[in-house]
Image (tube, coloured by chain):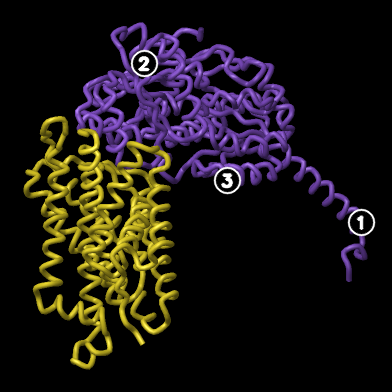
Chain colours: A purple, B yellow
Amino acid sequence: MSVLQSPGSVRRVLIAAFALAFAAADASAADVVIALSAPTTGTDAPLADPVVKGYKLAIKMANQQGGLPGKVLESVQDDQDKPEVGATVARKLCGIDNVVGVVGNFASSINLASGPVYEDCTLPRVSATASNNTLTSKGWKYFFRICSKNSDQIGQGMQWVAANWPDIKSVAVLTGNDASGREVAAQVAQIWKDRGVKVVSQVQATAGTSDFRGIITSMLAEKPDFIFAGMFDTDAGLFVKQARELGYKGRFFGTDAIASANFISVGGAQGTEGTYMTNLGFDPTKVASAAAFVAAYQAEYKEAPPSYAANAYDATMVLVQAWKSSGGGTDRKAVRDALASKTFATLFGPLAFNPVGDLAAPRIGIYTVAAGKIEFAAQSGSSK
Amino acid sequence: MSTLLQQLLNGLTLGSVYALLALSITMIFGVLGVMAFAQGAVYMLSAYVGLYIVTQMQGMSSFVVLPLALLCAAAVGAGVNMTIDQLTYRPLRNAGRLSSLISGIGVYFFIENAIGLLVGRKVFAFPTVLPTAQYQIADIRVTAAQLTVLATTGAAVAALWYLVRRTEVGLIIRGVSERAETAMLMSINPERIILLTFGVAGALSGIAGVLIGAYIGVVAPSMGFLIGMKAFAAAVVAGIGNIPGALIGGVLVGIIETLSSGYISAAWSDAIVFLMLVLVLVIRPDGLIGARAPQRA
């Protein structure tokens, strides 16, 4: 005997249907996902680890602080720092309806591969760390970044070097053999040529190289007194250590890619001592407005947060704020519009994006390795 | 000129470690006719063993720590390799070489992933255990670390040579390599010789793992893959199955890689090494010196 044939059943069915409709409406209005795309495996995983931690803490705190139209769910997607995996992750996230934003990708090359996919499905991204210049000149409407781009980082970094080390006469440049690396190498070389300093060696090495001695020996034969070591921390650490072993006595300068404990651990406290670098962002432990974040991070992970973690935290919070001010829901375009138009509260003060998705005001810090630790040395002003 | 000599020294040091791995691969091929793909994993595993020993014994003199680490790594390498033989190669003795090759590949990835899951996929820094002195001889910088690596590989190769050329066991190994059936007629059990060969090969891989870990300064679960490939290239280029050939091949690969990265292009140095492998095989399929494949019916 079917349900509809029993007495009073029609009314019961209708009530049940209404209840179900309300329940369904309740569930769909609530939870959204702000995903993270970064390498959690592979040689770049250690560098990206603070990004994962900062992101997770942000999701947790955002939900804790409340006042949101619903719950924000986390989803850590491993893109292995490989372009094809990044694109696969992008397709996957695009297809999940309640993903309203992505913190990512970690590395610039991956963004180049995943970008078109995200743009196609109008999913907004805020990257905490991708600094390749071209990312904001592709006409992408759904890409924003919390970090400054390479040309700002390199420009201000080299400006600082020229001002503080005027005795430099010959420069060697080492970068990785990828999108960011090639761009950075060209920019560094041009800056020094414009200043009339000789660039005696320009090398692009494969990430994951373990024995740099061949490269170093050829480089040192040209007698540089300043080497720009623009690779990721493990590679740069080995390079710096081996270069010192082979007798290099000059200066090293790197980028945000070496601002990590891993660089010092791999390169050795002695080998890395006195290496300077720029960093995309400020040291949260030195800025008063980030104190609450530092305390929370310390309590959660039992270690102090590096600037990458603060960037990731900010990127996530900015997405959360944008989603909230767009009224909640799963309208990706509304989230994007909010990102483009609003000013957000971040750990380092108010932040807004310029029309192409870059920071309206760049944030670059100069750091150095002193006594086995990365220390904040100077703060750069706005870019020239 | 001095740059060239320096580069040669760099390449020789790197190549000597490649040679150890190439030797282990070539020895297994000699007695079994199988490309032991799993050697890269044994090498990586032993590097971790060495790392563990060195970390536990931090603070003690390098003269004690380094030999101990090498010994333990060799022992573990030998044990693991023999286990790999018994579990994954032995059941496939009569199944053809392709099955054994695939089995070896599977074992490699299993071990790499298992270690990755157990200790994490990140890079571990190897504590300083090689001597840090540096010497300036004319325009060349020679580090005590390089000398130590060369001395250790030299000692390992000398020990191997002695084993193979001057002992009865070595004679039996060579016999089994050339004619397994005839050796059986002489009441020699090839199985035990194969096991012993795997053991020796594992010990060599183990020593190589610790040396590279200490010389370069990092270990990671993925470290065995590319170097395993280069060791293959080294073993094949000179002539697979040929022991002196593996030594020469290993050093050659190290030198070519280093010279390429210094003089041609750092990004292309690996590609050039493998291109060389392809060219040599196309021109001389038996390798530069001549392969010695086991004669099997």
Q: Split into 4 quadrants, where in the image is the C terminus of chain B?
A: bottom left
Residue A334 is left or right of residue B195, and the answer is: right
Task: Tell me which amino acid carries mark 1.
Answer: Val
In the rendered structure, find residue B163 and report the number of the disc placed on it. none
Query: What x and y, as percent, mark residue A190?
Result: 46, 16
Query: What x and y, as percent, mark residue A249?
Result: 21, 22
In this view, the residue in front, A145 or A71, is A145
Marks 1/2: CA distance? 88 Å
Q: Earlier in the sequence, mark 2 or mark 3?
A: 3
Please tell me which residue is depicted at 9% across the width and 44% down the height of the picture.
B62
Say above or below: B49 vs B38. Answer: above
In the rendered structure, find residue A10 and report the number of the disc placed on it. 1
Tally the marks: 3
Q: Chain of mark 3?
A: A
Task: Tell me which amino acid carries mark 3.
Answer: Glu
CA neighbours of label 1 inside 10 A, class few (<14), some (14 to 19), many (20+): few
Which residue was labeled with disc 3? A84
Marks 1/3: CA distance? 54 Å
Please, what secondary structure does the residue beneath circle 3 have? helix
Query: What x and y, as percent, mark residue B166?
Result: 9, 73
Please, what secondary structure does the residue beneath circle 2 have? strand
Which residue was labeled with disc 2? A198
> Which of pointers 1 and 3 indicates the residue nearer the eye?
3
CA neighbours of label 3 inside 10 A, class few (<14), some (14 to 19), many (20+): some
